[in-house]
Amino acid sequence: MSSPWRPTRALGRAAAIGVAVAASAAIGGRGDLAVVAVPLVALVVWAVVTRPTAAPRVTSRLDGEVAHEGDSVTWRIDVAPVPGLRDVVGHLPGDRWMTTTPTHGHVAGAVTDARHTVPLAVVGRSDRWGVRRLGPAQVGGFGDFAAFAWTWAEQRRESVATVPTPGTFTSRAGIPHPVGLVGQHRGARPGGGMELAEIRPFRTGDRLRRIHWPVSLRTGTLHVTTTYADQDAEVRLVVDAIRDLGERDLAAGRRSSLDVAVEAAGAVAAHYLSTGDRVGLSVLGGAGVVEVPAVGGHQQLARLLLGLGRAEPSRGTLGEERALRAQLGRSIPPGAFVVLLSALVSAEPLAHAVRLARTGHAVVVVDALPPELRGPEATDDALCDVTGVDDARLARLVWRLRLLDREREANRCAAAGVPVIPWRGAGSLDTVLRQSTRRARGPRVVSR
Amino acid sequence: MIRNRTWRRTVLATVVGADVVVLLVSGASLPGFLPIAFLALAAGTLWALARPSGWGAFALVLVQVGCLGVPGGSPQSALQWLLAAAAGAAIILTHLALTLLASWPVRADLPRATAVRWVGQAAALVWAAIGAALVGALATTTPLGWAPWIAAVALALVAGTVWQLRARTRRDG
């Protein structure tokens, strides 16, 4: 088996010049050249005698697999020393949204004790939610005088799931038709709750404390008050991650459509989980199938944020298209309140929203397109990036047409009973939820 | 850790300093050769520092050897042997400096332990050049009949050095 250590150019240079000068000194009887040749030849002999032969063992590890936005993780590569190994160098780069320290990712270490591994480490700060990738790691080692070099054959990569920070959202409006057992939303059926439903004559089985004495005295027969049941609801968040439009630049206050959608989804999830509802998540995009079943409780928010952190724009592969079709074909329980967060530039999610509305679900579409891309103030660079057209004038025209198309699709959604609202944080959903609740009390035609 | 800017500047200064030494030694032998040596060394240095991992480094060391070899002759006096030792030290330091520049990532800092080891090893090689010059200086003033004995002592020194190196390597392993 050949040695993993290779002689370097430096060794070749010292050997070639050293031998040539020594030969010249011997032939020409030149003592000064012999003085020049001696250290070069000595270097070659020294390097060859102490050359390493075995390949060092390398281990790679991250000090955490999950981080929050702004958190730092340490990527550490340990190189176990072998005889003759003197120095270890490495390049451990981060991705675009991972700021590493040192910034360039070049690190080095020296073997000081043969019993201890040589650590190479970079600290990476995750600047954006999502799967942050580190690597590929390039690690190498040197013997004495860097005369022999070794390169780690493996180019290791690591990844950190960065959980997004949810935005702020509150809502005072109830969910249209909650179907759970116990919660804070006014149900359609009578039961134990807070909101008065009616006053009716006493029936067998009614509780005595429900007797409404003023009406009973006035009419001469016993009457009781009834209330609507307080129920919990299932909220299904559907994040359209098929395309990510816009550029994230927090210094300039700009965010991409997926940033807006993820932040809004996190905020809505946090709110409804705090009110005791069950919240589920589907991410339609390029990161494989991200489905979080609807469950309540404190841990669910962490699961949802982790799922949102895996959202990635689609790359347009056949597998992704199949996964998207499978996700869109999944049934959603009756009575679930569906919130679709989308930039409204992909047809499939909108068609899905309309289909759900026709089967009796309450559906709201939240427009996640960044405001700077909606109007004429969009920069040429942003439009070229969004449309993929290099010519700025043509890109502006293409984007204008796309916006018109988008407006038409939003209007069609609204006509089909699916309101489309822009994301404005707290209270964004209140108006449409109140309208939906009023509509839900009336008779409905449902196609099944 | 030694900041990358600091160690790189030191290494560059070493290369330029070695060029100056070679130039002075060359000029001492043949002053008329100085302009040619200067031009050749300047071009070689620029090439070597621009691409230390390429042929530039080889060319610079070769030019330095050429600048010493072309105008000079075999040293006779102690001063000439001293100049030869300085030139030998300059060439080995150039080689080591270029090797460090080529092998170490441009932006990486240099661990202090690495710097100490390189300096120690460079000093050992410089002492080898000085030792060779000393032996040469002694040889020029020594009768020819002593040659076999001196050769035997030199061989013993080489054998001792190799034995020491092997012993140290085994101990490290």
Image: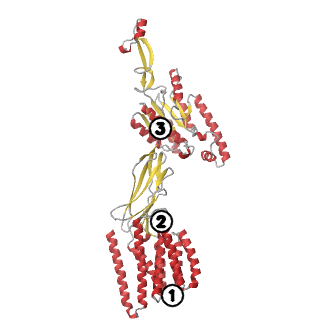
Which residue is drawn at the image coordinates 59% and 80% (left, top)?
B35
Task: For label 1, count other residues whose C-alpha is less than 10 Å away and answer few (under 14), some (14-19) or many (20+).
Answer: some
Task: For label 2, count other residues whose C-alpha is less than 10 Å away and answer few (under 14), some (14-19) or many (20+).
Answer: few
Residue pointed to by mark 3: A266
Which residue is drawn at the image coordinates 47% and 80% (left, top)?
B86
Q: Position of residue A175 (x, y in %)?
A: 48, 27
Q: Amino acid at mark 3?
A: Gly
- The chain letter for the residue carrying disc 3 is A
- The chain letter for the residue carrying disc 1 is B
Marks 2,1: beta carbons within 8 A? no
Q: Amino acid at mark 1?
A: Gly
Q: Secondary structure at mark 2?
A: helix
Marks 1,3: beta carbons within 8 A? no
Q: Picture quarter containing residue A190?
A: top left
Residue pointed to by mark 1: B73
Q: Secondary structure at mark 1?
A: loop
Q: Position of residue A365 (x, y in %)?
A: 54, 33
Distance from disc 2 to disc 3, alpha carbons, whole Å, reads 48 Å
Residue pointed to by mark 2: B6
Closest to the observer: A138 or B78? B78
